[in-house]
Image (cartoon, coloured by chain):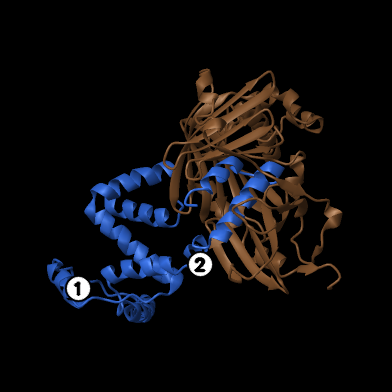
Amino acid sequence: MGQLGDNKGSRLQVIRFFSSFQTRVFFIAVLGLTPPQLLSDQLSDNPATGVQWLLGMRKAATTLNYHGVVAYIKDQQIDSFKLYHQVVDGRERERLVAMNSPFREVLRADGNVARYTADTHQVVVETKPSNQSVLINLPEDASQLDRYYQINLRGQEYVAGALTQVVALEPRDAYRYSRLLWIDTTTHLPLKLEILNEDGMSVEQMVFTTINTKDPIPPQDLQPSVQAASAITQISHRETLPVDGLKWTFASVPDGFQLVSYSILKRPPLNSPVEHILMSDGFTSVSVYIEKRDSRIKPGARKIGAAAVESVKLGDFEVTVMGEVPQKTVELIANGVRKKGDN
Amino acid sequence: MKTKDNGLDLSSLLDEELGYHESLTLMGKIESDRDLSVKLHRYAAVKEYMKSGNRLVPDAGFVDRIHAAIDEEPVIFAPRALRKPVGEKLTTYAIAASMAVVALLVGRSLTDYSPHRAGQLLAEAELTSPVTQASMEPDLRDYLTLHNETSYLSGGQGMMPSIRLVSGSVGR
């Protein structure tokens, strides 16, 4: 991974003038937007650190008005979306709409997320914490990322006509993927995001091809294209369970991955209840599914795009672990699952 | 000079080390320049071999085409070389011997080479890859959709959460 970063760095156009001047102007401008412990750092002559860039980016993504076209590249396919983000009186409203068939749309407003897909002709409405950005979620304490990732600055490049600072998150172990972020040096929005696998190959990428932070967004662009009444509306039912109720233990989980949620999913298209345990290190998520049924998923390792999958049989149960992590990570977790009391 | 630069760029493109804008420019050139396109395929075949070790099968005209290419090479009458010191001669012989070994190894791999067959092999490899198998298992696709949804809703995922939410529904 270090070699990858070095390669990236060598081909980046480094504009040292901006790195010293613009960075300082920005951090003087956002003094009120970052945690107090960082203020003293910002006032000093030290250039902004990677964590400071991430904090500025998170703030910009949730407080600025912007709209543009986003290209999303995954599984050797390119998908294009229009993205609208508006903040009025501190309340965010976001709309993401696919530009190609099949039509898909995500609308986030007032703490709800409505997702429409034309192929199922359904609107799925879920309740979601309203402070999560459509582009990127960082843990509340971004500095905790530093425990599992080296956060390095990799020079500057132009994306969508804007000068960006490249920030690299390189894992400190072999159980996570690297991330590259291109952060606009003026607006501090993330204009490009990329996930690299253990071989340094891009497995997922998002890039703004155009972005506008100046012109107001017409109200109709923030309205859903499909009204709930004209489609089948489905409120997702997740039976969230207390962690204490977990009937399973995980003997081998890489450092930093914490249990985020434990739930039983009963909604279609899954016909039988599935226990779902979500783990995260704050930036990378891994799901564990445990289901009691006849084996329909073949045991073994495989990939679905950027996601590594490992399925194992555990007595009468089927354990499937997946996430945007190296294969060895899901394999390690899957083989460490035990039923409580069976140890 | 132009060819050499393009060759380096092609190599960088295949290694995903070429910048975004440079890649777009180069791909535009490849579309309009047949020689460059052929060169890219050649580099890709070499890379594929080095990466996977898959043996490539030559078609019947492979040797004939090599002979034809040699016949088309201009004959160059170079001036007689000056007598070289013994040490330099030994170095030259050593390099030549190494080249011969490399040629032997490459020659063995090329015995199976065919540009047409290469494409077919790649297609077959894709069809039997674990990635494609996984995409055929609807239960796994549902799991992935749930993974993306839950990660997004719980705030546990770092990048592109809501785009994953809708991109995952394609093909369901």
Distance between the alpha carbons at the discs numbered 2 and 1: 37 Å
Q: Same subunit under labels 2 and 1?
A: yes
* Image mark count: 2
Quadrant of res B71: bottom left
Residue A263 locus on image (x, y percent): 75, 52
B132 or B37, nearer to the observer: B132
Label 1 is found on which chain of the structure? B
Residue A153 in sight from this viewpoint: yes
Quarter of the view holding residue A18: top right
Q: Nearer the viewer, residue A94 or A199?
A: A94
Chain A shade in the render = brown
Q: Nearer the viewer, residue A133 or B133?
A: B133
- Which residue is labeled 1 in the image? B66
Element type at mark 1 = helix
Q: Which chain is blue?
A: B
Q: Image point 77% across, 53% down: which residue? A: A258
Q: What amino acid does circle 2 point to?
A: Pro
Q: Earlier in the sequence, mark 2 or mark 1?
A: 1
For residue B77, above or below residue B139: below
Give residue A2's position: percent from left, percent from top.
61, 56
| Picture quadrant where residue B165 is located | top right
Query: Where does the C terminus of chain A fall, quadrant-wise?
Result: bottom right
Q: Could you say which disc has been placed on residue A213 in the image?
A: none
- The residue lying at 78 percent from left, 31 percent from top is A35
Relative height, residue B112 to residue A121 (above, below): below
Disc 2: which residue = B130
Q: Chain of mark 2?
A: B
